[in-house]
Image (cartoon, helix red, strand yellow):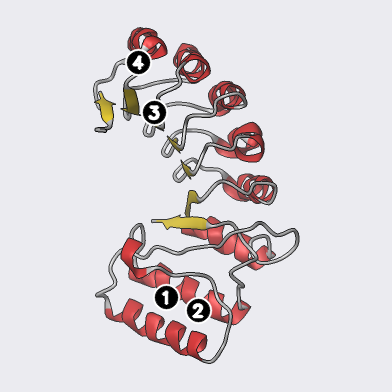
Amino acid sequence: CQVVTLDISDNRLEDSGIEMVAEYLKRSTIIESVALKQNRITGGDGATALAEVLRRNNSIKVLDISNNRIEAEGIAKIDEALATNNTLEELGISDNSLGAEGVANMRNMIVNNRSLKKIMLQYNNIGEDGALSLATFLQANDSLENVVLLEKYVRLLVMRGLISGGKQSKSDVVLFPQDTGDTKIQAALKEWEKAKANGQELIALPREVFEYQDAAAVTAFLKAALVEGISANKAVKMLMVGR
């Protein structure tokens, strides 16, 4: 069965336009993927309309609202709707204005929702407090598979031991470098493989799904992982690292 996609990104629809789109989406039974990137959606009427879609629609599995103007109040509305939604599997909320308060307002979708598999959260100025809140929520989740964060927040959580110790979830941290042909990445991978061959238990690094990273950050993260000895059963499944 072919996935039906609605992509009306980059149209500057603003909240009034999103409200009209939402009226259609609330009734749709065939749309599975919706992209509304860069449409000047705010946390006011736009977020309210999207929350209502999530309450009433049973077909949408992917919603990308990246590159908009949604802040803490807006994501709280979406979070409330996702407390009862059991269809959505992927939420793109990167490059908005969530801040640490916005992450705190995502508790329902991370702790209680069991359909969500992936959240793209980078470029939201979440700060250390937001990253720490996220780590706390993730420790209570056993169904979310992918969280996309900026590399600096991943390193913070590793250093604090929040994705390598304490209360454990059932899955792994996975790092996704962008270019495996880079000599620094190749050298880091060789060191990685050598450590694994020597019996060191480390996080997973699947080569077939590399993305979202540059050589310097990959090398630094791999080195940190080797030093810390991050175990595969001590962190969330796919903590993807963004530029």
Residue at (58% x, 79% y) in the render: 201
Q: Dot 4 lies on which element?
A: helix
Q: Disc 4, disc 1: CB below 8 Å?
A: no
Which numbered marker is on residue 68?
3
Residue with the most extreme front position: 1
Kindly report the distance in space between the C-alpha atoms of the residues bearing marks 3 and 1.
32 Å
Residue at (56% x, 62% y) in the render: 172
Which numbered marker is on residue 163?
none
Amino acid marked by disc 4: Glu
| Residue 51 vertical position relative to residue 129 in the rendered view, above or below | above
Q: Quadrant of the C terminus?
A: bottom left
The foreground one among 36 and 53 is 53
Can you tell which quarter of the image residue 14 is in? Answer: top left
Amino acid marked by disc 3: Asn
Of pointers 3 and 1, the one earlier in the residue sequence: 3
Residue tagged by mark 2? Answer: 223
| Residue 99 vertical position relative to residue 187 in the rendered view, above or below | above
